[in-house]
Image (cartoon, rainbow, N blue to C red):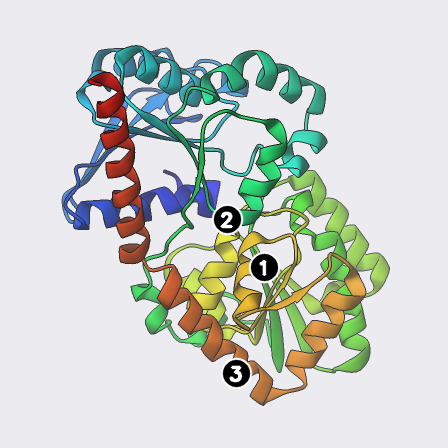
Amino acid sequence: MDPVFGGPVAAIYVMARGLLNAGMTVDIVTVHPRARSSVAFDDSREGLKWQSFPVQLAGYGVSLPLWRWLKAHVHEYDLVHIHGVFSFASLMAQRLARRAGVPYVVRPFGVLNRWGMERRKSWLKHFIFKWMEKPVLDHAHALHFTSDEEAADVARLAIKAPGFVIPLGLDLSPYQQLPPASLFEAQFPNFKADQTILFLSRIDVKKGLDLLLPAFKLVLSKINGVKLIIAGDGDLRLMADLKRAAEELGIADRILWTGFLTGDVRLAVMAKATVFCLPSRSENFGMALLEAMAAGLPCVATDQVALSVEAARAGAVSMTPVEAVPVADALIALLEDEQLCMDLSSKAREYATQNHSMAAVAGRLKKFYELLCSTSAKHANP
């Protein structure tokens, strides 16, 4: 539940709040790699409770206190919604829920996508998937995908559990009236720019920053006064490589690296930005893109961002291939045309409001849960 772990994790909090508002009881159980003891959280303002358990083996997230808690309590619930795979927590939750006869749903978090399976410890993931993950996923009552693109990608793995697509949601209230850009400017007083391109996400190889840097150089060859804000942290080695690449491209002095932003400053950087860009090579959803759309930013995103594919059909996002030149062309088109920016901004905000509000997504989740619980009860009592 730590915001540092990114948008997909933050989406769990939004799901839980929406479900509480819809009249359901929700408890969250999680692990934290830096926790030394079990901690219970109670957000009385929201009515939301969660427990965090310490990890004894960091690589796979092994937590014996979590296992003991699940073994003692999982039978008390009508349904378990498991977020993630390739972790001790998700594997134990699946096994213990099945043993207790409690229906369970698994959201793969995008980890089963071809990109994730083939580029990071590929041989180990395929081994674990075949012998540990797939047997329990096959018995899940459902897989929760956040986009049609993710569902189609994971279909190649022939998991027997049925798949359902329910997108992620967002609490839209903070985005309806952003804090002033001056709040961001006060944090970075030496940063001055006529126009700004914003990248707001984790620093990770799949996010496509190595494409954005040469694309940004092409933008600078056409438009003066533009600067790039890279807001986020992550892979330190990759960040060093990217900064070195920016030096070699001669654009380092046009880039502001802010690090991880939270709270009002995170919102204020969106007020400062002229356009938003997410040039990812793989996103099973694209939470950062949804935030930018909700904030009313004109957005450029690649066709490997699932939300981009869906929003582009409604004319709410400028979508490009995963290549530097098309990304640059899309950014230039927006930066040179104020009316185009205004039109895209309006459509982006409207799309986010109509399709991804906390209440709308919670309503779909509630119906989904009720269907699964009903189906489970019929199977248990034919």
Pointer 1 residue: 309
Pick whichever of labels 1 and 2 is earlier in the sequence: 2
Task: Look at the image and tell me whether residue 2 can be seen.
Answer: yes
User: The residue under label 3 is which amino acid type?
Assistant: Asp
> Which residue is found at the position 40% from the left and 76% from the top?
180
**Residue 241 location in percent, x, y?**
76, 46
Distance CA(mark 1)–CA(mark 2): 10 Å
| Location of the N terminus (image quadrant) | top left
Q: Which of 5 and 159 is in front in this view?
A: 159
> Which residue is found at the position 36% from the left and 56% from the top?
170
**Residue 341 location in percent, x, y?**
57, 81
Pointer 3 residue: 343
Crowd around label 1: few <14 · some 14–19 · many ≥20 (10 Å): many
Pointer 2 residue: 147
Q: Which of marks 3 and 2 is in front?
A: 2
Q: Pointers 1 and 2 in contact (CB under 8 A)?
A: yes
**Residue 96 location in percent, x, y?**
33, 13
Residue 48 is left or right of residue 330, and the answer is: left
